[in-house]
Image (cartoon, coloured by chain):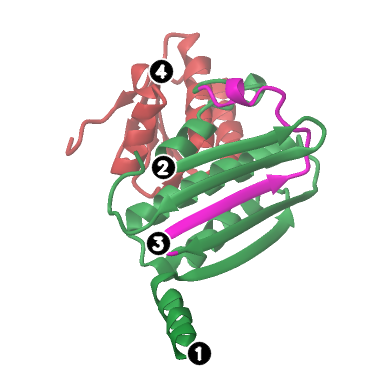
Amino acid sequence: MKEKEQKIAGAAKEERQNHMKLEFDSRSENEGFARVAVAAFMTQLNPTIEEVADVKTAVSEAVTNSIIHGYEGRVEKIIIRCSIKGDELEITVEDRGVGIPDVKAAMEPLYTSKPELERSGMGFAFMEAFMDTLRVESTPGVGTAVHMIKKIGTGQWGD
Amino acid sequence: MSEVKIENGRLTVFVPKELDDHNAKEIKEQVDKVLDSEWIRTIIFDFRNTAFMDSSGIGMILGRYKKINYSGGKVEAVHMNDRIRRMLILSGLYQVVRLEKKGE
């Protein structure tokens, strides 16, 4: 019994855990809100200014993709889930939009499906550069989920 | 609306604190209006007030470059922080937009 208690206390001490979920309309004025909300959530990890800026950029890219490409300007819901596990921040940005037919092609730098909108095609490249891990799941007609992980407290650029 | 300055064919755009998809659209419209009505040879994007930019900013600057390049005009970027400079380089934009050197 005593041993079990000690184990539980030990586990709580070594692994910080926290979670949040955010749901908002796919309006461009919410891009600023979304990245600031995630930045506020991550402060408990004592990030550097650089790390906060990396995460804000990555969140902004993913949310902008959902607004412009996922929903193509329609106002629907975007969901952001953030988890803290130890010193890692895990972010998922999810939409129920049109999906990406060819994820590999979409992730190529300078690729854009909407050149008429003056998109630079650098969204996924910046997410990749500023986060440690980037994984994109998408099904045409169902939606897209972008998973990103970043270890906080390493004091390095995301590459 | 962003602050702009027009002087001797040079249009300086003072980029706002944050440059994302939302306000990139506003700057695009504002700059294009000036390009359509004034004789502009150089567009200068001044980032002295800008703390945040994402890839929407890259797209907006590239779009203005394409527009002014038709008539032989040029684009410059000045007073950007290290992070924005890095994004301009990562995206390849430095090949067509003159970046002010550090400490210039």
Q: CA distance from mark 1 to mark 4?
A: 79 Å
Is residue A85 part of the magenta span, yes or no?
no
Q: Chain of mark 2?
A: A
Q: Residues within 10 Å of mark 3 (few under 14, many from 20)?
A: some
Residue B19 visible in this rendered orientation of the protein: no
Q: Residues within 10 Å of mark 2 (few under 14, many from 20)?
A: many
The label number, if any, that marks residue A130 in the structure image: 2
Task: Answer with mark 1 or mark 2, whichever residue precedes in sequence.
Answer: 1
Task: Answer with mark 3 or mark 2, whichever residue precedes in sequence.
Answer: 3
Q: Residue at x 58, y 27 (%)?
A: A119
Q: CA distance from mark 3 to mark 2?
A: 16 Å
Quadrant that contains the C terminus of chain A: top left
A159 or B99: nearer the eye?
A159
Q: Which residues are magenta?
A: A86-108
Residue B97 occupies quadrant: top left
Which SS class for mark 2? helix
Q: In the image, which is nearer the foreground, mark 3 or mark 2?
A: 3
The label number, if any, that marks residue A139 in the structure image: none
For residue A52, above or below residue B11? below
Q: Amino acid at mark 3?
A: Asp
Q: Amino acid at mark 4?
A: Arg
Q: Chain of mark 1?
A: A
Which SS class for mark 4? loop
Circles 1 and 2 on the same chain: yes
Q: Which residue is mark 3?
A: A87
Palette colour of chain A: green
Q: Which residue is mark 1?
A: A1
Circles 3 and 2 on the same chain: yes
Q: Residues within 10 Å of mark 4 (few under 14, many from 20)?
A: some
